[in-house]
Structure formats: C-alpha cells, structure tokens
Amino acid sequence: MGLSTRSQQRWCPEALEDGKPGYLYDFYLFAQDGRALDLAYLLDRTRPRHKHLVHLCLDHDERSVRFTVPTVLGSTAVIEIVQFIYDTALYAARPGSSRSPDKLVDAWPEYVIGPRNPLTFLEPSMDCSFFSA
C-alpha cells in the first residue's frame, strides 16, 4: 500500500501553520503489486472518519483513492485520520480487480466522488479554466 501527499503547490506560497483554516491536505492512497482496493469495505470501515473529510475520490479501476482533509483540524487529528484510513486500506487490498465504482458512489453522500467527476482527474497544473473560475 502506498500513500503520498502532494507537495506544497504554487497557489499556497507560505508554509502552513498547524490548524490554520482555509487549506486542504490532499492525500493519494494506492494499492501496489497488482492489487485493488475493496472500495465498499474501505468506505464502510472508514465511515466514522468521513465527517472530517472534504472529498473522498474513487479511481476508475479500484486501485487508488484520494481524500482531502482540512488543515483546520490540526496535525494531531489529521495524522490520526490518515493513519486510520491507511491501516484500513491495508485490509481492503485484494488481488486485482477492474470493476467501476460508479454504482457504489451513487449509494454514498456527495463527498464520495466517482471517476467521472472532474474533481477526481483535474488539477491546477492542467491548462483549463476550471480552477480560475
């Protein structure tokens, strides 16, 4: 299982202060070695932490998820949330799969976003007007 966070982006010129409002941490969690994530299991088991997330973005082939956590929670809470989701994902990793999560997304609230939603694949480095609107 891999976990990464995007480095500080150009639209955030200053270092973030612990608990400072107005920013999001963006985490990318991915299965390795040909495995996929049992997304139904992952969503169900991490449900108690969802109230702290802004987005939970599902990949088209169940190999990764992205989730955003507001910085206002403070580093202690953010670390606990990320560690809990990571630990749960270790148990959600299964031998490869290629199912689409679209039907699964429909059963969850709006913060769970499927692969067809532009928020799952667009990012500020892309040449489009979505982020400057």
Image (cartoon, helix red, strand yellow):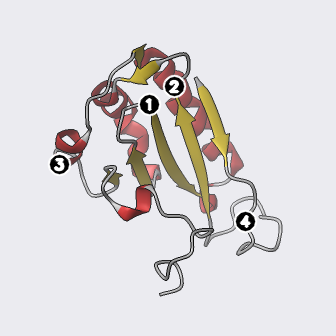
Residue 111 x/y as whole percent: 34, 56
Q: Which quadrant holds the N terminus?
A: top right
Q: Are marks 4 and 3 in contact (CB under 8 Å)?
A: no
- Reading the image, the residue beneath label 2 is 31
First in residue order: circle 2 vs circle 3: 2
Residue at image position (62%, 46%) is 78
Give the farthest residue toward the top.
Answer: 95
Element on which disc 2 rests = loop
- Residue 9's disc number: 4
Element on which disc 3 rests = helix
11 and 35: which is toward the camera: 35
First in residue order: circle 4 vs circle 3: 4
Q: Is residue 34 above or below residue 47?
A: above
Q: Kindly report which numbered mark, 4 or 1, lies closer to the viewer in this rendering.
A: 1
User: How far is disc 3 from disc 1 in space, using C-alphas?
Assistant: 19 Å
Q: Amino acid at mark 4?
A: Gln
80 vs 8, left or right, is: left
Element on which disc 4 rests = loop
Q: Are marks 2 and 3 in contact (CB under 8 Å)?
A: no
